Image (cartoon, rainbow, N blue to C red):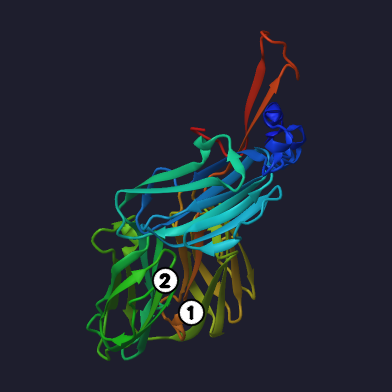
Amino acid sequence: MRTSFSHFMRSLEGLFVPSRKLSKRARRGQPRLRPRLLLESLEDRRLMASDLSITKTGPVGSVAAGSAVSYTVVVNNAGPDAATASVVDTLPSSISGATFTSSATGGATGNTTSGTGNLSNSLTLPAGSSVTYTVTGNVVPTATGTLSNTATVAATGTTVDTNTANNAATATSTLTAPTADLAIVKTNGASTTAAGSTQTYTIIVTNSGPSAVTGATVADTLPGTLSGATFTATGTGGATGFANGSGNLSQTVNLPAGSTITYTVTGAVSGTATGTISNSATVTAPTGVTEINTVNNTATDTDTVGATATQADLQIIKTSGGTTTAAGGNLTYVIVVTNNGPTAVTGATVTDTLASSITGATFTSTSTGGATGATPSGSGSIADTVNLPVGSRITYTVTGTASSTAAGAIANAATVTAPAGVADTNPSNNIAVASNVIAPTTSQADLSITKTSGGTTLAPGSAATYVITVTNNGPTAVTGA
């Protein structure tokens, strides 16, 4: 409502005596009072009455140090007048790398559409308008205690806020020790090797989160039957600490959630080697980081040493339908297995052991070029023994759902392995990894309230009746509104 001073000032009009009613002596040296102009001037000084409010939602319950967090801040003007306001969200020092985006409705202006660091905007908010901010960042790995963050809105200019009780909103979570799912896979794409031959292994280290890990140890102590070993390393997703080298592998690395490190190890099999060559690689979380799944922290490749009868280049490629998904969202992978020759292969093994954060997985397959042995349709992980003529191909389509508690990233590897008696001429393409970053999600709902009375007028002393209706329009249930 607009509050005017006119009625008040008219009640004082009798206090001002127009100069024409004064005596000549009284008028001498006196300013002429113009009450009507004074009243009209004060009439224009109106107070803008509005109910500004702010809400902030974020992670519920506990948050692991080193993990990603997301907050939703909504600024609203319930009216009845338009308002000018400042909105501030100063993030705690335990959140780093913060970015934000915003969107406005109802004609609101002044919001920064995207930015970094703390939030500070001067807004113009028509009655009924709102601005929604989405703030994301990472909890520093050493953070402890409580993660608390407050956003505020304050009236500026001529705006008067009729209810300041809803001008601040705080989201609070309990910080826990960093947790992560570190995993390692190792393969040379074959189950046999020959004495005196060259052996190439591919080792892939991943962090499926939710926390970043600083100081993980990657180790691969090579067997004595493999000599002259060298290795190269590459990383994705911000991984650091890896390097090229020779001999045994032992490195301390840093793995943000969703990152990977790929090592390619090459060495010579002893000319007198017999029996089997078995080699294990490990990844170990540092002190202070809780490992979610220790089963995938060791990977072993075993080959029988013998005569090599045939050669072929088996290849596998795995892609996903996108690079990001939400917890509870759908996942689709396409896996293509090919024999590039020069000889046909009977009894190759195709495997795709799905990550525990992928649920309800099913798959189908199609074969071309005479390939056989692929399961036409199934559920869960893939483990097929297949026959691949030269130039043939098998295509698997895997669908599933990211678990509702998934965080960080999901990294999943598929492999093809030549059977005994077949040497793969290019083992570096026998393993393929597809990764999906789990986008932070925040529960959202549209809460509304209406209030009606039995009429527009009331007689003094009569009873008044109001009906107040509170509704949740979804999409999620709300506890504690």
Quarter-wise, where is residue 143 in the image? Answer: bottom left
Q: In this view, does 424 lie above or below 12?
A: below
Q: Earlier in the sequence, mark 1 or mark 2?
A: 2
Residue 388 shown left or right of residue 231 in the figure: right
x and y, in percent, of residue 329 in the image = 56, 52
x and y, in percent, of residue 440 in the image = 50, 55
User: Disc 2 marks which amino acid?
Assistant: Thr
Residue corresponding to mark 2: 260
Name the residue nearer the viewer: 252 or 226.
Answer: 252
Q: Helix, strand, or loop for circle 2?
A: strand
Residue 448 shown left or right of residue 384 in the figure: right
Residue corresponding to mark 1: 429
Q: Residue visible at 44% across and 47% down?
A: 150
Q: Is residue 12 above or below residue 140?
A: above
> What crowding class fits label 2: few (fewer than 14 Cα within 10 Å), some (14-19), or many (20 or more)?
many
Name the residue nearer the viewer: 212 or 433.
Answer: 212
Q: In this view, does 266 lie above or below 103?
A: below
Can residue 184 be seen by looking at this rendering?
Answer: yes
> What crowding class fits label 1: few (fewer than 14 Cα within 10 Å), some (14-19), or many (20 or more)?
some
Can residue 362 be seen by looking at this rendering?
Answer: no
